[in-house]
Image: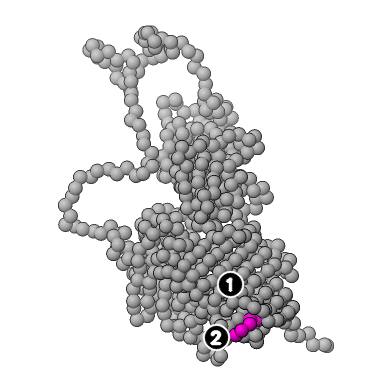
Amino acid sequence: MADVIQLLPDSIANQIAAGEVVQRPASVVKELLENSIDAGARNINLIVREGGKGLIQVIDDGVGMSETDARLCFERHATSKICEATDLFNIRTMGFRGEALASIAAVAEVELRTRRATDEVGTEVNISASELVSQQPVACPAGTQIAVKNLFFNVPARRKFLKSDSVELKHVIAEFQRVALAYPEVAFSLSHNGSELYRLPASGLKQRIIGLFGKNINQHLVDCSTQTSIVNIGGYIGKPEGAKKTAGEQFFFVNGRFMKNPYLQKAVMSAYNRLLAPDTYPSYFIYFDIDPQSIDVNIHPTKTEIKFEDERMIWQILHAAVRESLGKFSVVPPIDFDSVPGFNIPYLPKNAPVTFPGIDIDPTYNPFDEQPTSVHKSPSADRHRESVTGWEQLFTDLPQESTPIQTRIETFESEGMLSNAPENTNRFYQFKGKYILTTVKSGLMVIDQKRAHERILYEQYINGMQADINLKQRELFPQAIELQPADFELLMSKADELSQLGMEISNLKHNTISVNTMPVSSSITDPAKLVENLLAIMHENQALPFDDAKHRIALSMAKASAIGYAKQLSQFEMQEIVDKLFACHEPNLTPDGKKIIVILELDEFENRFK
């Protein structure tokens, strides 16, 4: 029998390695930026086109490479960082395994220009799918310029699974932010399709955070630092009131390397226990300085996971450091048993709903009667009609027309959906500020108020777009909102669809938008709050299997504009939600397939008492 085991060709081996290292354009960005950092660059420019699918170019002023090194760097396991096995346990550089450039060159077209400061001319190397196309001398500035074009051009299956330009750009920006945060002393810039998104001069850590995430984050940053014999911790954490609904500003760095660690993230979140609003995430930028021999950075191909020698001790130190910072800067209210009690003045939060006091009027009340009629014991309708005089007589003889809501309820009762409750009792009850309860013939109907409103708004938006109905109201003073570059690009790419839903935005440049109109049906009146909710939902809905972009935007807007779970509803509001919900095409499910209505059968209650 012939031998069946054979060595793979280098081209196939490089493509297999590329599948581990290069997953999307952001992976290429990470590797190239880290190479520039290791080369001692002080100025790094990143240029991206089509979300990185068309072009990724990195220009730095590092040490450069010789003619031999420029060709050898594309070979597998060619590295200047490792000479012997013991060097693996004393790593402080970013790249060291020698797989990045070889893997990138296996699935793209690469052009490299590099020159050392001591050389008169540089070297240009062109490689396509691991094949050397040309190598020649070239005039270029000191440093390295590398351009990666047409990523996955020779692997159509991989290129087919890449997302849209806005999604890929989001991942590119995320990698750019991680490297820029790790090295604030290095100047960075990022441009996409000719538009500059970031220009970050060399600065301190706090200035770098502000440059990346906007000026608004400055008021929410709290210093967090501690020094122990095991690890030194530094950086900043965010105040609880600055927490956001999306988990996008959480960063761990170990010896200048970005790290993902859910275990240590729990240490930070537990330190914020009872300080955060539900479903919100605080910002933190935490840096660990630890002995390289007590960690292992070589457990994952992308080097984003790090193994600690004593992870439990690191957890306790981190948790204590965050709690100390929150208490030191009066973020956690202190307990003072000697304080003098003051007046308990109720506090009305901003944008809190205001309930006007109700007025009970008895039109038959006569102050000269010896036994006046009580407000709660009103006479019959006939006696009331006889007692009124003057202008009140104009309204007593009008026919009592049934409202659409009454008509809808009568329909439910005729179909056996709702029970025949007396008119003077409440038909609906709100439970925990989340559910609407009402009795039906078969038991108890439970309606999720937020999901019900999402279904109502979704069908309203879809019908409005198809019929070209005006759903907007113009803002008297349009509000300017500064966004992160990825969010700015995402919103501007959906500006036409948002305008059809009633939200017109305009580009004010420098990652700033102006909200000119708001949807008339939105329960949110603050444009900044609506934009924040909308972006959070749009990021979640990017993976939904919607072929039509309008349906995706309509769902995002409906989720962002729907009433919250903590909102207290009146009887009229609950009745209106139920009425509009059962008028929808599909009242039982949300547009993304979640249950809205649950009926608890009467038999279930009876079985509970057996």
In the picture shown, does residue 379 fall above or below 479? Answer: above
**How packed is label 2: few (under 14 Cα within 10 Å), some, or many (20 or more)?**
some
| Picture quarter with the N terminus | bottom right
Q: Distance between the Cα atoms at labels 1 and 2?
A: 22 Å
Tell me the amino acid under the disc marked 1. Answer: Ile
Provide residue 520's location: percent of width, then percent of height. 51, 36
Q: Mark 1 points at which residue?
A: 59
Circle nearer the viewer, 1 or 2: 1
Report the side of 592 relative to 449 (left or right): right
Please tell me which residue lies in front, 606 or 584: 584
Q: Would residue 607 be seen by someone viewing this image from the given angle? A: no
**How packed is label 1: few (under 14 Cα within 10 Å), some, or many (20 or more)?**
many
Check residue 380 for magenta coloring: no
Determine the secondary structure under disc 1: strand
Please tell me which residue lies in front, 177 or 594: 177
| For marks 1 and 2 on the same chain, the one whose residue lies earlier in the sequence | 1
Provide residue 89's location: percent of width, then percent of height. 49, 86
Q: Residue 358 carries which label?
A: none
Report the side of 282 relative to 127 (left or right): left
Check residue 121 for magenta coloring: yes
Residue placed furthest toward the right:
1
Magenta segment = 118-123
Q: Do the residues labelled 1 and 2 touch (CB within 8 Å)?
A: no
In the picture shown, does residue 136 fall above or below 83? Answer: above
Determine the secondary structure under disc 2: loop
Provide residue 366's location: percent of width, then percent of height. 27, 13
Please identify the quarter of the rendering in which residue 283 is found: bottom left
Q: Residue 81 carries which label?
A: 2
In the image, what residue occupies the spot 41% across and 80% down? 290
Tell me the amino acid under the disc marked 2. Answer: Lys
Report the side of 251 relative to 495 (left or right): left
| Picture quarter with the C terminus | top left
